[in-house]
Image: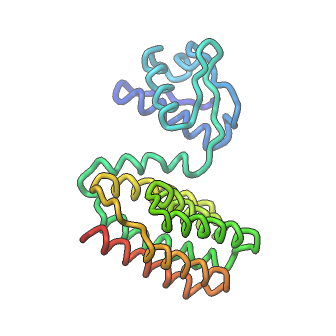
Amino acid sequence: MKYVAKVSNTTKCDQVVEQIKESIIRGVYKTGDKLPPEPALCEMFGVSRITIRESLKKLNTMGLVDIKHGSGTYVKNIDLGTFMRPMFQLIEFDDIDIKTIYDARKIIEGGTAYLAAQNRTADECRKLADILSHFKDAVRTGDLVQIRRLDSEFHIQLAKMSHNTLLQACVTTIEEINNACVKRISKANVTLEGNYAEHYAIYEQIEKQNPERARDAMITHAVSSEEVLMD
């Protein structure tokens, strides 16, 4: 924190949060590191202790730090998804609807499936097949909670198979937003036999290492899911 700039009188808390976040991103503070105590942070940023406490609470809410009372504030083990979590707050606004989500899914997850078919390993394919096996069992018993969980697991595992950490973070965030949106519109019967078949078609093309068909199968699945949710 050698070159920390004094913050202005406006939005002091947000400016402190942004500078500490930038320091974590740049590796000035690494996972497990303890942040300077409150008096030192007050001096660094030229703000009050109240502002520092508010800033640390925000960083804690964002998942960047862990506040241990009586011990101090420590940097958490974070990844790209942590920095993308603020996207999840968009679900509260009216401009995030099914069409918005699925337009993004077609582009992002279609490309993710393409890369997964190119880059997947045999072990990763076995993990995806295992998720599908449990998915099929959940469909057979009509366990909607398990179906939703396994649906998300499938998409997140597939994103891992792309071997692209940025896409993985995007897909994880989109899954969270999608699940929240589905709950908001009270669609309970979104994933049943037809949905399982669509997932299997995606898996089949990835296992065969056919990028174009994997992408097409993912887009077909996204279009189908959108139609069900929009109905």
Camera-nearest residue between 23 and 57: 57
Residue at 63% from the left image edge and 18% from the top image edge: 72
Using the image as rendered, state which of residue 57 and residue 11 is in the foreground.
57
Taking depth in this image into account, of 107 and 156 the one nearest to the observer is 156
Residue 66, how many percent across, how many down?
A: 59, 28
Is 126 displayed left or right of 230 in the figure?
A: right
Give the x, y percent position of residue 53.
48, 19
Residue 208 is at least partly visible in this image = yes
Identity of the residue drawn at 60% across and 77% down: 203
Q: Residue at x 48, y 78 (%)?
A: 198
Please indicate whether residue 56 sits to the left or right of residue 115 in the image. Answer: left
Q: Name the residue located 55 percent from the left edge and 33 percent from the top edge.
A: 20
* Image quarter of the N terminus: top right
- Camera-side residue of 19 and 114: 114
Residue 9's spot in the image, x, y percent?
Answer: 36, 24
The answer to whether residue 167 shows anywhere in this view is no
The type of colouring in the image is: rainbow
- Where is 159 relative to 72, above or below? below
Instruction: Give the quadrant of the C terminus.
Output: bottom left
In the rendered image, the vertical position of residue 210 relative to residue 108, given as above or below = below
Q: Position of residue 50 (x, y in %)?
A: 43, 15
Which residue sits furthest front? 141
**Looking at the image, residue 140 lies above or below residue 47:** below
| Residue 182 shown left or right of residue 107 in the figure | left
